Image: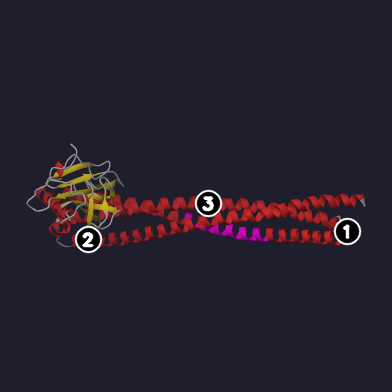
Amino acid sequence: MRQALNHSYRFLRRAKSVRTLCIRLPKVVLFLFLLLGVGSLAAQNTDQQIAAQKRLIADLEKQIAREEQEISKLKKGRASAEETVRRLARQIDSRNQLLDVTERDARKLEVEVARTDSVARGLSASLDAHKRRYAEMVREAYRNYKHNNYLTYLFSSSDFNQVARRITNLREVAAMRERQMEQIVTLSEQVSVERTRLTGQQRALDSVKRSLTTQRTRLQKDSQAARANIKQLSKKEKAALQQKIAREQRLDVAIDELRKLTRGNKEGNTFTAKTSNLRLPVVGGGVKRYKGNMAEIAGPKGAQVISIYEGKVVEVKRNRITNKYDVYIAHGEYISSYANLNSVTVGKDDKVARNQQIGTIGSGVDVMTMQPEYKMVFGIYGPSPKVQMRASDCFKK
């Protein structure tokens, strides 16, 4: 009898610890599922970004295919040599854009693969811990059954109320084992889902990396073909080619029409024809050449483009030839223009501060070397055509 009571005492102590565990376990599981929910939301946002990147990649690939067809037709026909080179330069730029977008896609996928792997490993660790606890519960239940501890525990009660409480305790232990089993099943399913997601993401990443290798190879071939065509051009043809490309880079919105929008504008109205010593509109950039009121400014890949002065955005346009953005900002009744931006961070009628970012530098091709580069074209315009402006007067010497 004493031995049975000792077993009952040990069982009671275990039952109390099990009840404590029963209270804590739901909190642990709730935390895990909250963590998983936050991770799922992050994954959804990243998936949307990756989908947008893939749509952009598809558009660029279609554009490159069209350009290849045009170049093929030019070669078969009697088109001028400079026209062929100009088309090749545009194709190289498109190919370079595709390379940039694909690299961003790969970086996003790498981040998502790392996140998913972390979630999967965390869930696996939690699953292992739940399995260990459940195994201990099963062993404990078997020991209690073998030694008749459940009956001893009940019959050692001092009254019927205590019997009822102990029956409730036993039911709680049984329910806890059942919940533990359900949690194991749920976690197993979640681990399987995350592992499947991880496998799919790794395959997508491998595919993107293979695409990057292919695009780099094609870019090199395009550059070699273009350089071969350049060598065949005469000095006159080269000059004509540069003039055509310069015309493409010029802004296709009539400045006279924009001047109408600046009348009475008070934003940045302290700007005058004598305003100088300003920062270049490309962070970390340098001037390649000045031409009257225009300046061609090169910079590093992804460089920020900033407004030279406070003012108001009067127009944001997508250039139909280069497929890049052009931004026009009014400083009082003066206008500054920023052409060949890869992306923009402002919209029409936005107020901008001096040196505020308005976008990022766009890609291009040096037509004489056929090497990809990053540049933008800056312009400055007075309140009327009579006010002649020089871009070189605006910036720090």
Q: Which image quadrant is residue 275 in?
A: top left
Residue to which mark 1 is pinned: 155
Q: Which residues are magenta?
A: 181-202
Q: Label 2 to label 1, Cα distance in Å?
A: 90 Å
User: Please, what is the three-letter code of the amino acid marked with disc 3?
Assistant: Asp
Q: Which of the two labelled residues, at mark 1 and mark 3, occupies the earlier sequence position?
A: 3
Q: Nearer the viewer, residue 392 or 72?
A: 392
Residue 318, position as x, y percentages in the image = 24, 59
Circles 2 and 3, Cβ within 8 Å, touching? The answer is no
Q: At label 2, which amino acid type do we have?
A: Arg
* Secondary element at tag 1: helix
Q: Which residue is mark 2?
A: 320
Image spot of residue 67 (x, y percent): 25, 60
Is residue 183 covered in magenta?
Answer: yes
- Considering the whole magenta stretch, tell me its main secondary structure: helix
Q: Is residue 221 left or right of residue 15?
A: left
76 and 102: which is toward the camera: 102
* Circle 3 Cα neighbour tier, 10 Å, few/some/many (<14 / 14–19 / ≥20): some
Q: Residues within 10 Å of mark 2 (few under 14, many from 20)?
A: few
Q: Quadrant of residue 179?
A: bottom right
Name the residue located 19 percent from the left edge and 48 percent from the top edge. 378
| Residue 117: mark | 3
Q: How many marks?
A: 3
Q: Is residue 64 magenta?
A: no
Viewer-side label of 1, 3: 1
Q: Which amino acid type is marked by label 1?
A: Phe
Residue at the image position 6 percent from the left and 51 percent from the top: 386
Single out the residue that lies furthest toward the left: 386
The residue tagged with tag 2: helix, strand or loop?
A: loop
